[in-house]
Image (tube, helix red, strand yellow):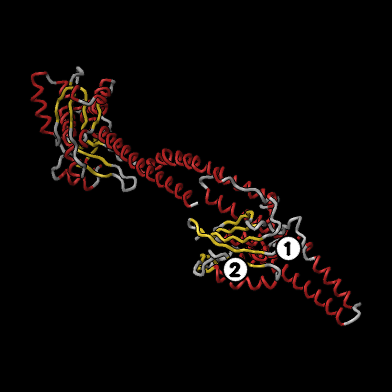
Amino acid sequence: MTWLFIRFYVCVLIVLSMAWYIHGSVVKSRADAEWERVIVEAHGGGARLVASELDASPPESRERVLKSLRERFAYPVDVIALTALPNSLQRQITSGDDVACFRPEKRYYIVAALSGGAEVVRLGPFPNYDLQEIEQSLGGWMRLTANRLDAATPGERQAVLKKLQERSDISIDIVGREDLPAGAGKRIVRGEDIVFYSQNPEPNERWFAATPLSDRTEVVRFGPFPSFERIEQKAATTTLALVLLPAALAIALLLRPVARQLRRVEHAAQAIAAGDLSARVDERRVRSAKPLAQAFNNMASRTEALVRTQRELLQAVSHELRTPLSRMRFAIDLIETAKDDQERKRRLESLDAGTEELDQLVGELLSYVRMETTEPKLDLEHVALHDTLGVLIPKHAALYPTIQFEVSENVAEGSTILADRTGFQRAIGNLLSNAGQYARSRVKISMERADRVTIVDVDDDGNGIPESEKDRVFEPFVRLENDANGHGAGLGLALVKRIVTQHGGSVEVLTSPLGGCRIRTIWPA
């Protein structure tokens, strides 16, 4: 599951990085476009006016006119060939645009086409536009406009003004000096010929420029000038469209297989809830949620084992405990009819044997249930097999007096097995008890060291176990058909297998050299 979330967050980080990059690109692109718009609108009229001055002058006097114009402008004014412009700008001019803006080396210029189409007049580069630089950059063509209006008679002035207005992207009109804000009017009175001023307070601020006519009582007012639009909101909207929508699609495509895999887990859970405890999630088909599938399958296996144990326990309680209880009830009835103390004693001994058998059955049942329902914590230590047999063999020899228990010479006193002492003693004890029940006369315990494992064999000389039954003997509550003794609940070998498996080992049934059965347990070294 951790890997799933890592993939998801990496995808989110990639999306955010893309959003940051695209947002920056969109803002830059829009800012560049805004600069071009502002420069074209602010200086387009001046460029057209300069072009008209040059077009109106004879070829032999063009240099003189150009020199005169340069003296009026605060930035360079040049005549260059159309082919000196970038190809995109050439196409823009030849397609009908009379002015255009371009930005080589991050500096803005504006060009206007001259008559004939082979040359253009270039104005710029323009400054960074603080207040003083704005007035200087506007001064050239504003003075040129004022000169034309001063040269016209009062009757011609409106016609000249209209013609100038047609060449400009900014409104041009003649107003009285008193119509200007107080600060701008005082600057005109002091003799300044270019004044850039604000007409309205923020946020509806509008900028104008004014230059006086010859009598200085009237001024030519230009404006309002173009201002930068707030591009952040537009850029954010564009970023949302360019990034977040594809990102949502990408995340949906990423999560779609994950959702499909999680549905497999959901279907398995629904199957278990419906009673199919064998339902599992195919871990190969849920790679993104493989840890979840593994945890789910482990839980399902554990649940199935618990339910199976409960069922088996109920069956055992109803079946296995019935025999000793019936025997005890029969013994109690016989005690009342005993003729003498000797017979009464035999009946009590039979009752005591039944009680012991019942206690053994209950002990086996509780041990098996405990191992199946909990995962015991193993306290591993080096356990000596020789010492363990020294404790267990005398007990089993007393229980099975007709059986000879032998320890092979290869079980050395110093030989140890890394195991939980209690579990190891329980497993070996069950093997000895099982062998003692089915042996005719001999039980032999041997030990062998192999590659990183220790092998413990318990042999008997009984009838052995049929080949078809060798796997079943390790199942709980299973007793062989030829089991004449009928002792126990059939849990001894099941407990052995459980204990050995918990240690990471294995157990198997082989044919003994003694002629009976060999139970081999393999313990990790």
The answer to whether one can see residue 479 in this image is yes
Is 122 displayed left or right of 11 in the figure?
Answer: left
Q: Which of disc 2 and disc 1 is earlier in sequence?
A: 2
The answer to whether 150 is drawn above or below residue 351 in the figure is: above
Within-10-Å neighbours for mark 1: few <14, some 14–19, many 20+? many
Rendered residue at 63%/70% (across/down)? 393
Residue at which label 2 appears: 425
Q: Amino acid at mark 2?
A: Gln
The answer to whether one can see residue 230 in this image is no
The answer to whether 280 is drawn above or below residue 140 in the figure is: below
Q: Residue furthest bottom?
A: 341
Q: Is residue 321 or residue 166 the one in the foreground?
A: 321
Is 254 displayed left or right of 93 in the figure?
Answer: right
Rendered residue at 81%/65% (across/down)? 323
Within-10-Å neighbours for mark 2: few <14, some 14–19, many 20+? some
The answer to whether 258 is drawn above or below residue 308 in the figure is: above
Q: Amino acid at mark 1?
A: Ala
Q: Foreground mark, 1 or 2?
A: 2
Q: Is residue 276 or residue 266 the one in the foreground?
A: 276
Rendered residue at 31%/48% (across/down)? 201
Give residue 176's position: percent from left, percent from top.
Answer: 23, 39
